Amino acid sequence: LGTVEVRTGHDQFASFDGIAADPSKRFEYGLGSFDLLREVAGTLAASAGRGTTLSLLHSLALPWGTTVVHRAQRSDSRHWARRGEGGVTVMEGEQRTLPDVTVRWSGRPLVLGAIFSSVSGSLRWLQVRQSVTIPVESFLAPQTRVSRLSAIPVTVGATSASGHLAVSASYNRTERRDSLPGSVTDTRTEELTADIARTFDLPRSWRLPGGLRTRITWQQSGTQSYVSNLAAVERRSRLTDNGRRVLTLNAGTDLSGELSFNLQASRVVTFDKNFNRRFTQTLVSAVLNVRFFAGVLR
């Protein structure tokens, strides 16, 4: 059945304005009912709240280096705010995380065993629902704001049999929908990262203590969001459409036991299609590190 872990938590808080009385020990340590925390020496708190969280974690180890982890969480909260003389606003919120499943695998492939000594990967499926209920003035119905988030991150990595080559890549796609009174906002974010690291052997005639360590990293991210009116579902407006691309090259080696040299070059492109803007940065740096021991300081 694997490992099952259940956690629960409860928190309370209260904030007072312009009060000279000292709270009781029960208030300081959060003992007693919540109504006791909302009032000190006959004065109501300016704001107060409480929350409860319940989470379930299930981990299952399968054959061939596969592990499945499932997590479910539920959180409920209530917040009070004082308004004027005797008026109170109550806001209620809840969050549900279900499903949240992660599958991990690591091992040595049979087909590419001569090339890679180890290969690992993970896949996660996450869905979160959040809602907040806010009361409004007079006879109108309370406003309920609902947010739904869905994410699917994927990561893979491999190391060569000689240990001189390591490759990794990750991709994450996140979709979010915010339902506000009178409108709906859809946001999509994509992130991609690829990394290759390799160590090259240098000629022995150079008499260097180590090899040449190189790394190439590519990062790309983009965000798009649109808002639509409930009265005109077919029409929507673009709020954001921007992103970033980064290419980084890094090479370094040890010249001696006390000297090391590192060369880095990067190109960063930031764009915003909503405002038709593009900004490019190019950076090249060379660093010589010197390490020495000056003796014991007195």
Image (cartoon, helix red, strand yellow):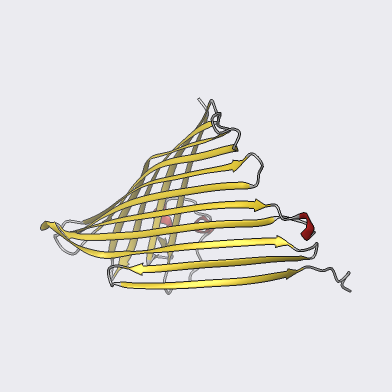
Q: Nearer the viewer, residue 188 or 53?
A: 188
* Residue at 47% across, 46% down: 9
Q: Nearer the viewer, residue 28 or 286?
A: 286
The quadrant the C terminus occupies is bottom right
Q: Nearer the viewer, residue 65 or 138?
A: 65
* Rendered location of residue 163, percent (x, y): 66, 44
Q: Nearer the viewer, residue 119 or 9?
A: 119
* Rendered location of residue 267, percent (x, y): 48, 67
The reply, left or right, for residue 123 in relation to residue 116 is: left
Residue reaching furthest to the left: 231
The reply, left or right, for residue 272 in relation to residue 34 is: left
Q: Is residue 284 above or below residue 213?
A: below
The quadrant holding residue 270 is bottom left
* Rendered location of residue 180, percent (x, y): 23, 58
Residue 19 in view (yes/no): no
* Residue at 46% across, 52% down: 11
The reply, left or right, for residue 273 in relation to residue 72 is: left
Q: Is residue 156 above or below residue 212?
A: above
The quadrant holding residue 158 is top right
Residue 285 in view (yes/no): yes
Q: Is residue 20 above or below residue 174?
A: below
* Residue at 26% across, 65% down: 239
* Rendered location of residue 151, percent (x, y): 37, 47
